[in-house]
C-alpha cells in the first residue's frame, strides 16, 4: 500500500490518494486495487492521538474545509467548523476527510477501471456497506500513522459511519458525533431512496450501468433522484418560509403548462447541478449502503452492538428532520445508553430540516463544541 506525497500531515488542503491494495467487501465480491482520496488539515502530534475524522454526506467529497481549490468550485462542506479557533481547531487537531469507498471524487467506485479490463466496473462493482467504508477509512488512518481518533463526526450517511466507527473499533475512538443519523434508516427514507434509484435506472442512457464512454450519461434520471432527495432534506415549514407559492423568476420548461413555482425552479437547478458533478452509479451504490445499514448487523441484537461502544457518543437530532426524525435520533441515544455506552443527546431547533448540519453553523457549533472541548468522562 502506498501514500502519494508520503504519510505526513499538511496544512494545505491538497487532494491526495492512498492506495491500499485489495479489499474484501462485507457482502461478497472483491476489489483488487482500492484507492481512497483524502485531504488533511493540521498536524498529527507525537502521540498520534489528536486525529479527527470527518465523514461526508451522500454526494459529498473529501473537501471538508478550506475555500475553493483545484477541482473544487466551492469551499469545504464543513468549512465553518474546521480551522484555527473553530470548533475543530486545526491548531490542536489533525483533521482527515476521505471520499468514501464507492464514491466518485477520487476514491475507487463504479466509475473506476476494473483491473484486468479496460472498462469501468459499472454495476459489476460489489455492493458496499457502511462497515466497508469504515474499514477502508481505518486502513487509511493506519497508513497515516494515527493511533487513536480523538473524534469522528459526520451527518446523515456520514453519521451512520461515525456511529459504526464507535461500534466496530471501540478501543480506537475517544468520541463520536453522529448527526442526523440513527442505527437504521426508516421505511419512508428507504422508499424515497428507491424512488431515486429507479429514476436513474429508468433513464435510457443508464444502459444497465454501462454508459461510460458512450458520450451520454443518465443525467435526467440522476437529476430526478436529486430532486426527490432534496425534498427529504428540507422541512415543510422551511419550504413555506423559503419558497411559499411564489412563481419562479426563470421561464417554465413548458410555458403552456401554467408557468412554474419557485420551488420547482430550485429543484431543477439542484438536479442539474448534481448531474454535472456526480456519477449516477455511485449514487445507486451509496444510497443503497445508507439503506442497508443496521447497527445490529452481525450481532445478536442492537443492544449487543451498542454495548461494544467505549467512546463517548453525542447523537445530534434536528427538530425538523423527517429523514432521520429527532425522536428516532433521541431513541438511538437512549438505546445506546441503556446498553452501557456513554451516550448523550443534543438537538438543533431549526426549520432547515435534514440539511441543517450543512448550513446552520451557529446552532451546530453550539451543539457540538461543548462536547468536543469538555474533559473526558472517567
Image (cartoon, rainbow, N blue to C red):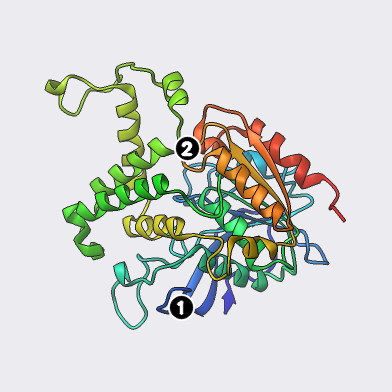
Please give the residue where the numbered disc 1 appears in the rendered image: 33
The percent position of residue 195, horizontal first and vertical second, equals: 30, 47
Q: Residue furthest top?
A: 246
Using the image, determine if residue 274 lies above or below residue 95. Answer: above
Q: Which quadrant of the rendered structure holds the C terminus?
A: bottom right
The percent position of residue 322, horizontal first and vertical second, equals: 47, 37
Residue 175, image quadrant: bottom right
How would you rate the neighbour count of disc 1 (Cα within 10 Å): few for under 14, some for 14-19, many for 20 or more? some
How would you rate the neighbour count of disc 2 (Cα within 10 Å): few for under 14, some for 14-19, many for 20 or more? many
Q: Is residue 213 visible?
A: no
Q: Nearer the viewer, residue 274 or 348?
A: 348
For label 2, the SS is: loop
Q: Nearer the viewer, residue 310 or 256?
A: 310
Mark 1 or 2, nearer chain start: 1
Q: Nearer the viewer, residue 284 or 180?
A: 180
Left of 118 or right of it: where is 259?
A: left
Left of 163 or right of it: where is 233?
A: left
- Of circles 1 and 2, the one toward us is 2
Please give the residue where the numbered disc 2 appears in the rendered image: 322
Amino acid at each position: 500500500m502506498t501514500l502519494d506525497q508520503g504519510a505526513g500531515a499538511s496544512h494545505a488542503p491538497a487532494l491526495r490518494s492512498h492506495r491500499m491494495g485489495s479489499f474484501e467487501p462485507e457482502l461478497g465480491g472483491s476489489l483488487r486495487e482500492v484507492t481512497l482520496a483524502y485531504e488533511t488539515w493540521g498536524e498529527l502530534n507525537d502521540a498520534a492521538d489528536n486525529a479527527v475524522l470527518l465523514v461526508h454526506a451522500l454526494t459529498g467529497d473529501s473537501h471538508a474545509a478550506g475555500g475553493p481549490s483545484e477541482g473544487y468550485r466551492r469551499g469545504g462542506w464543513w468549512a465553518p467548523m474546521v480551522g484555527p479557533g473553530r470548533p475543530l481547531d486545526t491548531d490542536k487537531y489533525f483533521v482527515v476527510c476521505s471520499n468514501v469507498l464507492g464514491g466518485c471524487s477520487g476514491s475507487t467506485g463504479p466509475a473506476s477501471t476494473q483491473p484486468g479490463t479496460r472498462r469501468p466496473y459499472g454495476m459489476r462493482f460489489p455492493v458496499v456497506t457502511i462497515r466497508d467504508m469504515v474499514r477502508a477509512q481505518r486502513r487509511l488512518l493506519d497508513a497515516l500513522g494515527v493511533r487513536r481518533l480523538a473524534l469522528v463526526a459526520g451527518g446523515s450517511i456520514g453519521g451512520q459511519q461515525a456511529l459504526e466507527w464507535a461500534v466496530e473499533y471501540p478501543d480506537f475512538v475517544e468520541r463520536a458525533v453522529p448527526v442526523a443519523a440513527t442505527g437504521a434508516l426508516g421505511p419512508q427514507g428507504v422508499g424515497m431512496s428507491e424512488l431515486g434509484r429507479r429514476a436513474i435506472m429508468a433513464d435510457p442512457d443508464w444502459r444497465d450501468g454501462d454508459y461510460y464512454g458512450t458520450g451520454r450519461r443518465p443525467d435526467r434520471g440522476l437529476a430526478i433522484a436529486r430532486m426527490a432527495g432534496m425534498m427529504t432534506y428540507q422541512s415543510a415549514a422551511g419550504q413555506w418560509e423559503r419558497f411559499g407559492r411564489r412563481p419562479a423568476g426563470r421561464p417554465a420548461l413548458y410555458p403552456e403548462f401554467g408557468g412554474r413555482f419557485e420551488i420547482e425552479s430550485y429543484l431543477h437547478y439542484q438536479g442539474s447541478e448534481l448531474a454535472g458533478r456526480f456519477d449516477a452509479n455511485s449514487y445507486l451504490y451509496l444510497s443503497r449502503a445508507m439503506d442497508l445499514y443496521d447497527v445490529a448487523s452481525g450481532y445478536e441484537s442492537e443492544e449487543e452492538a451498542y454495548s461494544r461502544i467505549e467512546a463517548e457518543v453525542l447523537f445530534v437530532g434536528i427538530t425538523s428532520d423527517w429523514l432521520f426524525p429527532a425522536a428516532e435520533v433521541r431513541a438511538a441515544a437512549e438505546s445506546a445508553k441503556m446498553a452501557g455506552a456513554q451516550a448523550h443527546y443534543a438537538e438543533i431547533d431549526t426549520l432547515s430540516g435534514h440539511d441543517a448540519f450543512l448550513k446552520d453553523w451557529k446552532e451546530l457549533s453550539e451543539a457540538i463544541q461543548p462536547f468536543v472541548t469538555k474533559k473526558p468522562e472517567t
